[in-house]
Image: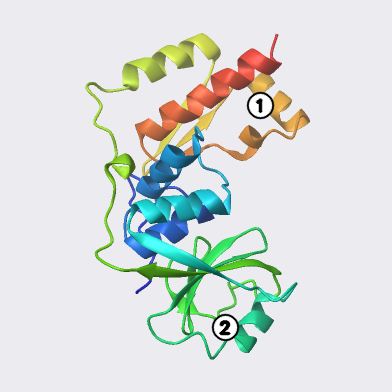
Amino acid sequence: MLIHPINNSTSDRNRYCGPAVISAITHMTSGEAARLIRSVSGQRAVRGTYTRYVLKALKLCGVTYERRQSDGNLTLARWLKEKKHLRTAGRVFLIVAGHHFQLVSGRRYVCGRTGEIVSVRDKRVKRRARVREVYELFAHGNITIPDAARKPKRQSSNRSQINKWIKEYGFEVEYERDAQWYWVSMSEDAEDKAHELNHWLQDSHICVGLDEVEGRMIDMIEFVKEHMD
C-alpha cells in the first residue's frame, strides 16, 4: 500500500484528522472522506470521530485492517523505535496517539496536521504523544471511492436559503476572496452565549463552499433555539 498527501480540495475539504487519514489512503478529498464517515456514523458533521468509524469507512473502500499491540503506554517516538523492524516499505500503520489519527509507512508520516508526507522526525510530528491503538492496513485489490462519499448534486443554489436565515436569525456571512472561504457567525448575543457555554461553535467560523455554510447554519439555528430565549 501507499500513502498520499491529504487531498484538501478547495471546494470539498474537512480539516479534522479522521477524514484526513482516509484521504491519505484512498486519495479521495477530505470532504468526501467526511461524508463517508457520516454515512457510517450518523454524525451530522465530522469534527472528531471514533476509530471504529474510520475503520468502517476504510472497509467500504476495500481497505481491511488487523489490530497490532501498542505495548502499553509507549510514546509515539518509542513505538517508532521499537517497531522499526515492522516499518518496511509498503506496510501502512494507522496509529491513534494524542487523540489524533496518523499514518506511518516506513519513515514516512502523514496526518491532518502535516497535510503532506513528511519524515517521522519532522517537527510537526507529536512524538511524545502516547500511543493508544495501532492498526495495520491492507488493500487486497483496487481501492474504491463509494457513492456515499460523493458530493451530492443540488437542484438549485442554496443562496436563497442562506439569505433567508441571515435575515431571520441575524447571521453574518463574509467571503474572503484571497483565502477562498466564508466566515460565518451568529448574532453578537448568540456568539457571546457560545463563549459563555464554551460551545464548539465559538471557534467554528470558517466554511469552504456554500454547502458547508448551509450545514454550519443548521448547527447555529439549533444552538439559537436551544440556548437563546
Q: Position of residue 61 (x, y in %)?
A: 33, 55
Residue drawn at x 45%, y 51% as measured from the top left: 56
Q: Position of residue 120 (x, y in %)?
A: 54, 80
Instruction: From the image, state whether disc 2 or disc 1 is nearer to you.
Output: 2
- Note whether residue 58 is visible: yes
Front residue of this view, candidates 14 and 167? 14
Q: Amino acid at mark 2?
A: Arg
Density class for disc 2 (Cα within 10 Å; few <14, some 14-19, many ≥20) is some
Q: Amino acid at mark 1?
A: Glu
Front residue of this view, candidates 216 and 143? 143
Quarter of the rendering containing residue 207: top left
SS of the residue at dot 2? loop
Quarter of the rendering containing residue 197: top right
Residue designated by label 2: 121
* Above or below, comparing residue 113 to residue 155 in the picture: below
Q: Position of residue 128 (x, y in %)?
A: 71, 74
Residue drawn at x 62%, y 39% as measured from the top left: 203
Residue drawn at x 47%, y 77% as measured from the top left: 118
Precedes in sequence: disc 2 or disc 1: 2
Query: Real-space Cα distance between discs 2 and 1?
Result: 40 Å
Residue designated by label 1: 191
Q: Position of residue 108 (x, y in %)?
A: 46, 80
* Above or below, comparing residue 158 to residue 184 in the picture: above
The quadrant of the image that shows the N terminus is bottom left
